[in-house]
């Protein structure tokens, strides 16, 4: 890819990159400390007390190339709704959404949203992950 693709696991709050990036793709911790595990490592991966949505948003905002950068984010529906409200304050707009269900008849369990700096027509798609 000639140096055009950087695949890395970054701590977004401490990321030092030489130039803004075109894409950030993340599946952040999203539980708000409810039912924390006695295992510290499990809490870090699943709970948002070490990285809340405001911290994530501001960190990613500074990493993205303006005006073309995109943030792809996976969250449960309630958390995505909250994140969207925060993102709009920074003029980061939802542009594409994938609603994920276990079955046709089940409720949405996760939403993947692409955010960008241009306010475009919002495209919605459904994904059914039948097992």
Image: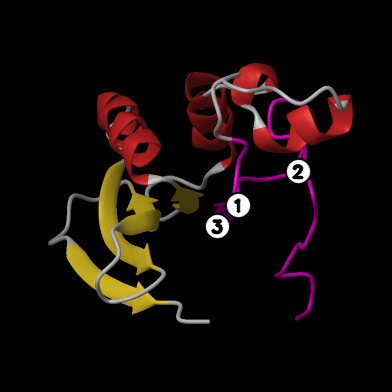
- The residue beneath circle 2 is 18
When asked about the image quadrant of residue 108, the answer is: bottom left
How packed mark 1 is, by other alpha carbons closer than 10 Å (few <14, some 14-19, many 20 or more), is: many
- The residue beneath circle 3 is 23
Q: Are the residues tagged 2 and 3 within 8 Å (C-beta)?
A: no
Residue located 48% across and 30% down the image: 57
**How far is disc 3 from disc 1 in space, using C-alphas?**
6 Å
Asked whether residue 8 is drawn in magenta, I would say yes
* Circle nearer the viewer, 2 or 1: 1
Q: Which residues are magenta?
A: 1-29
Q: Can residue 15 be seen? A: no
**Residue 73 circle label:** none
Please say if 86 is above or below 92: above
- The residue beneath circle 1 is 21
Return the x and y of residue 22 as percentages of the image width and height.
54, 57
How packed mark 2 is, by other alpha carbons closer than 10 Å (few <14, some 14-19, many 20 or more), is: few
Q: Magenta stretch: dominant SS?
A: loop
**How far is disc 2 from disc 1 in space, using C-alphas?**
9 Å
- Label 2 element class: loop
Return the x and y of residue 97 as percentages of the image width and height.
30, 61
Q: Nearer the viewer, residue 46 or 36?
A: 36
């Amino acid at each position: 890819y000639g140096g055009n693709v950087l695949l890395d696991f970054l701590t977004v709050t401490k990321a030092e990159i030489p130039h803004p990036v075109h894409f950030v793709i993340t599946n952040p911790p999203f539980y708000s400390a409810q039912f924390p595990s006695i295992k510290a490592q499990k809490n870090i991966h699943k709970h948002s007390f070490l990285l809340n949505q405001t911290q994530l948003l501001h960190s990613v905002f500074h990493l993205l190339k303006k005006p073309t950068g995109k943030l792809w984010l996976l969250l449960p529906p309630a958390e995505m709704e909250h994140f969207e409200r925060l993102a709009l304050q920074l003029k980061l707009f939802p542009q594409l959404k994938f609603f994920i269900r276990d079955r046709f008849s089940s409720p949405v369990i996760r939403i993947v949203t692409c955010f960008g700096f241009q306010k475009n027509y919002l495209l919605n798609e459904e994904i059914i992950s039948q097992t």
